[in-house]
Image: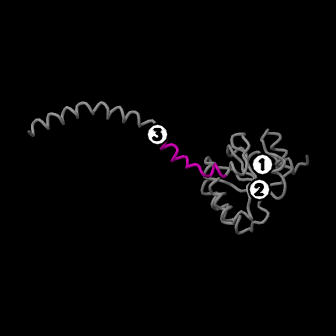
Amino acid sequence: MRDEKKFLAKWICGQLDKSSYVFVTDFSKVTVKEVTELRRELSKESGEFHVIKNSILSAVASERLLPISEAMLCGQNAIVVGGSNPSGIAKIIKKFRKSSNGEKFAVKGGVLDNIGLSCTDVDALAELPSIEVLRSQLLSMFNTPAQQCVRALNAVPQGMLNVLRAKAER
């Protein structure tokens, strides 16, 4: 491998180290203005959009044992990496794809925690709630049994109080 390609491969490795996921997209029909808007939206979630050479991505993926198939590496590709919220990034990508009616921009697949994702998997990831919502739901689930226990313990004295109040009113 030539020095330039080694440098690019090292740079791509650095980009892949930024997050636990990478989404491979086809951007062949997207204008520069649209890519700029996509990058602006991705930066809100600390995501980055990079155009890369397929041969270098293939070499890096095989070196890192990433399950990126050869079918994903056809045509003009870009990767989306960065940030700690893959669901938020997937939402931005899905929204951008829908705004172009899926004709200009396509998601070929991706990798999340060394697990290969198809286009439909990325769409399913986009449907998940944000990490903050998931955390609040989990805390609510932990809190519910304690609340039910307190209500059950409080029900006996409350019932006795209601009986005494009813007797006193007669």
Where's residue 22, x and y in %?
72, 48
Q: Quadrant of the C terminus?
A: top left
Q: Which residue is mark 1?
A: 12
Secondary element type, mark 1: helix
- Magenta residues, as a range? 123-140
Where's residue 109, x and y in %?
74, 50
Where's residue 13, x and y in %?
77, 45
Which mark's residue is nearer the viewer, 3 or 1? Answer: 3
Q: Is residue 155 left or right of residue 15?
A: left
Q: Which residue is mark 3?
A: 139
Quadrant of the rendered structure where residue 151 is? top left
Going by the numbered disc 1, the residue's amino acid type is Ile
The alpha-carbon separation of the residues under discs 3 and 1 comes to 38 Å
Most frequent secondary structure within the magenta stretch: helix
Secondary element type, mark 3: helix
Label 3 packing within 10 angstroms: few (<14), some (14-19), many (20+): few
Q: Is residue 152 above or below residue 99?
A: above
Q: Is residue 85 left or right of residue 106?
A: left
Asked if the residues shown at circle 2 and circle 1 are in contact, with their CB atoms under 8 angstroms apart, the answer is no
**Which one is nearer the viewer's eye here, 152 or 99?**
152
Q: Is residue 92 left or right of residue 144?
A: right
Quadrant of the rendered structure where residue 159 is? top left
Which mark's residue is nearer the viewer, 2 or 1? Answer: 2
Residue at coordinates 80% horizontally, 55% vertically from top-left?
A: 52
Q: Which residue is mark 2?
A: 78
Going by the numbered disc 3, the residue's amino acid type is Leu
Q: Earlier in the sequence, mark 2 or mark 3?
A: 2
Q: Is residue 119 above or below residue 31?
A: above
Residue at coordinates 22% horizontally, 31% vertically from top-left?
A: 157
Residue at coordinates 55% horizontally, 46% vertically from top-left?
A: 131
Secondary element type, mark 2: strand
Is-magenta flag for residue 98? no
